[in-house]
Image (cartoon, rainbow, N blue to C red):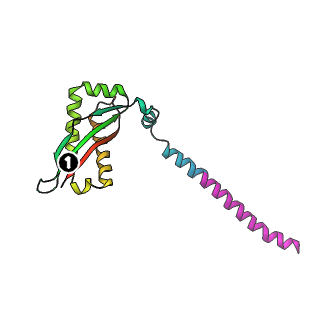
Amino acid sequence: MDEPKDEAASPKGKGKSKLIIIVVALLVVGGGAGWWFMRGTPASAEVEDVDPSTRGLLSFTPFLVNLSDGGGSRFLKITVQAVLGTGEQAKHAEESPVIQAQARSAVLEILTQQVSTALVTPEGKEALRKALVERLASVFPKEIKVIDVLFADFVVQF
């Protein structure tokens, strides 16, 4: 009678071991895929390795712009600062009137496309910040890395 129990237990044991092997394989494959996607690009790793205290800040004079709301009666007053990869990069940008003019023009283009109802929400401010980072990164020479954009003043007039 012991033999039928062994035969019945044997298929169950094989099924459990196959399940364990499949789960372990999925964990290994999933972990590898997660690592692959989370590791970032070499450029982003380069920026992350920089000591934040060595980054540079490029300040702009305050912007006062009409917003894209209908009627043209909405205004935005904002002070923007760009966080750059290093202090040397910020110094180079500050000393170049062409780079400053191009950057200021790019910021103005983005700001005048905004709508007041979006800007008063946290999501709207975050979307604006991201748009400014992307636009400034496209305007600056490749050796200047745009890390972030900070808002020192942010006033929407209704």
**Image spot of residue 137 (x, y percent):** 31, 37
Q: Residue at x 86, y 71 (%)?
A: 3
Q: Residue 79 placed where, x, y %?
A: 25, 40
What is the x, y in percent for residue 5?
83, 72
Within 10 Å of the Cα at label 1, are there few (<14), some (14-19), or many (20+) other Cα atoms? many
Specify whether 59 is left or right of 28.
left
**152 or 82, which is in the foreground?**
152
Quadrant where the C terminus is found in the figure = bottom left
Which quadrant of the structure image shows residue 138? Answer: top left
Q: Residue furthest left?
A: 71
Q: From the top left corner, tell me how far across and down residue 114 is, in percent.
A: 22, 51
Find out whether residue 24 is within the magenta segment: yes
Q: Is residue 139 above or below residue 30?
A: above
Q: Quadrant of residue 142?
A: top left
Q: Nearer the viewer, residue 134 or 112?
A: 112
Label 1 residue SS: strand
Amino acid marked by disc 1: Leu
Identify the image quadrant of the N terminus. Answer: bottom right
The residue at the point 25 percent across, 24 percent down is 95
What's drawn in magenta, residue-wise?
1-27
